[in-house]
């Protein structure tokens, strides 16, 4: 009797595929919520009548939890597990979205910032859970493919988010800005209150979606993974170092990641406001963040194809730093749409920095690997500092010339790609060319 092999995938494979689909949905949510900020900044600047510096406090509120919540997030995951930790993160994000409703009703900027802080807190917990989860979910040799898919989900959502919010919140904003100049104070207040109310329905929908996703994750069949029993030491961990601060290549890497994340978020979150400052209508400028994130998506695809077959991660980091320098200089010295195009191209320059910096920074840490990874997660708070500094400079010297801030950032990353990643490092076995975590 002839036995016919079944074409159905084994149950374990189905389970992994379903888990990847669920985590991919979460990364889509990450990207959507995160890159809404690029539309929120010009919206809140108009609705709450803010300076550039005040408007860019949006990024401070949203990204500072990565610094404050790095270790508490790890404790939450230790107590609740990966799956429940993801559900908790979604619930906290829903609370943040809910705060937007009274913030919009009263047009209170402080409440908007509180809502963003809560969203960032939930996202920090969610990121801390889902990034390592997608790495350990399947075989190590296919981690690069899984995480690149996550990155693409993130950036596609990020390209769509500001367009959707912009179409709702920034509709007729250009004509409103002109009318506000000659309005009586009472009429001006009424118009701005109406503008603020435009985000109430979108954020009610967001609350519902986040809660439904949280409940779905909680009751899902996502497998729980125990990492506590894994030995972090390796055959190459022959060091006698007793402190994480004895690894200068890690500390320099944390600083490089801090600067890189600040530059990446600045490029994506400032381009709409920058376009508007050049006289481009917000109805057109709302698409600019999508251009930046399209460049990042293209970079992810290049990384999938070329690393490590055609070049190493260290070379990718060096190339991206050089491109960042070139594009930053041209963004400052050119004008109009050409200058804006170079800001959009920074998306391509930034694309491979995250996956390249991680293995260079945490390679060779041995038993300090988890602690080193926590330091790297804390470095995401660079996005809480650098955009407001840019906004302050923009108030003083103009938004275009304020992009000078990017030049020393890319110079430092270039230094790290050439020399810094080797500082004080004991020669170890190659650390591989997998993307360690998805952004």
Image (cartoon, rainbow, N blue to C red):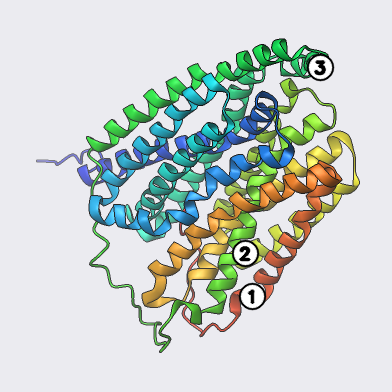
Q: Residue 237: percent from the left, percent from the top?
A: 39, 82
Of the numbered discs 2 and 1, the one sitting upstream in the chain is 2
Q: Residue 57: percent from the left, percent from the top?
A: 62, 42
Q: Residues within 10 Å of mark 2 (few under 14, many from 20)?
A: many
Q: Residues within 10 Å of mark 1 (few under 14, many from 20)?
A: many
How much space separates mark 2 and mark 1, taking CA atoms?
A: 9 Å
Circles 2 and 1: CB atoms closer than 8 Å: yes
Report the disc number at residue 420.
1
Q: Is residue 308 above or below residue 338?
A: below
How much space separates mark 2 and mark 3, taking CA atoms?
A: 42 Å
**Secondary element at tag 3:** helix
Q: Nearer the viewer, mark 2 or mark 3?
A: 3
Q: Is residue 36 above or below residue 225?
A: above
Q: Is residue 296 left or right of residue 15?
A: right
Give the quarter of the image for residue 395: top right
Q: Which residue is mark 2?
A: 256
Q: Could you say which is closer to the camera, residue 355 or residue 97?
A: 97
Q: Which residue is mark 3?
A: 178
């Amino acid at each position: 009797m002839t036995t016919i092999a079944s074409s159905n995938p084994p149950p374990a494979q189905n389970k992994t595929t379903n888990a990847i689909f669920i985590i991919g949905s979460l990364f889509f949510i990450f990207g959507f919520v995160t890159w809404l900020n690029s539309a929120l900044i010009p919206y809140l600047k108009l609705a709450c009548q803010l300076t550039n510096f005040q408007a860019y406090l949006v990024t401070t509120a949203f990204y500072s939890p990565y610094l404050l919540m790095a270790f508490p997030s790890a404790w939450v995951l230790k107590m609740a597990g990966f799956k429940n930790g993801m559900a908790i993160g979604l619930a906290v994000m829903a609370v943040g979205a809910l705060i937007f409703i009274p913030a919009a009703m009263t047009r209170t900027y402080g409440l908007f910032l509180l809502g963003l802080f809560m969203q960032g807190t939930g996202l920090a917990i969610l990121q801390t859970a889902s990034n390592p989860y997608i790495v350990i979910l399947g075989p190590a040799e296919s981690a690069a493919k899984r995480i690149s898919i996550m990155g693409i989900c993130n950036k596609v959502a990020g390209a769509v988010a500001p367009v959707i919010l912009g179409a709702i919140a920034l509709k007729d904003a250009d004509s409103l800005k002109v009318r506000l100049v000659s309005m009586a104070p009472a009429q001006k207040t009424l118009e701005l209150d109406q503008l603020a109310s435009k985000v109430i329905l979108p954020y009610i929908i967001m609350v519902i979606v986040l809660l439904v996703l949280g409940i779905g994750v909680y009751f899902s069949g996502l497998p729980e993974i125990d990492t506590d029993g894994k030995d972090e030491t390796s055959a190459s961990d022959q060091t006698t170092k007793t402190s994480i601060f004895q690894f200068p290549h890690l500390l320099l890497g944390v600083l490089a990641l801090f600067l890189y994340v600040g530059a990446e978020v600045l490029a994506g979150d400032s381009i709409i406001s920058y376009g508007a400052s050049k006289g481009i209508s917000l109805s057109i400028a709302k698409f600019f963040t999508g251009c930046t994130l399209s460049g990042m998506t293209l970079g992810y695809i290049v990384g999938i194809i070329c690393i490590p077959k055609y070049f190493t991660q260290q070379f990718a980091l060096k190339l991206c730093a050089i491109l960042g320098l070139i594009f930053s200089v041209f963004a400052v010295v050119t004008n109009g749409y050409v200058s804006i195009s170079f800001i959009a191209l920074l998306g391509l320059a930034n694309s491979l920095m995250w996956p390249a910096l991680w293995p260079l920074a945490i390679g060779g840490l041995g038993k300090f690997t988890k602690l080193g990874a926590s330091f790297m997660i804390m470095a995401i708070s660079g996005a809480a500092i650098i955009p407001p500094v840019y906004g302050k400079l923009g108030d003083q010297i103009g938004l275009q010339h304020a992009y000078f801030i990017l030049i020393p950032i890319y110079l430092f990353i270039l230094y790290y790609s050439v020399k810094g990643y080797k500082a004080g490092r004991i020669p170890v076995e190659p650390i591989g060319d997998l993307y360690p975590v998805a952004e």
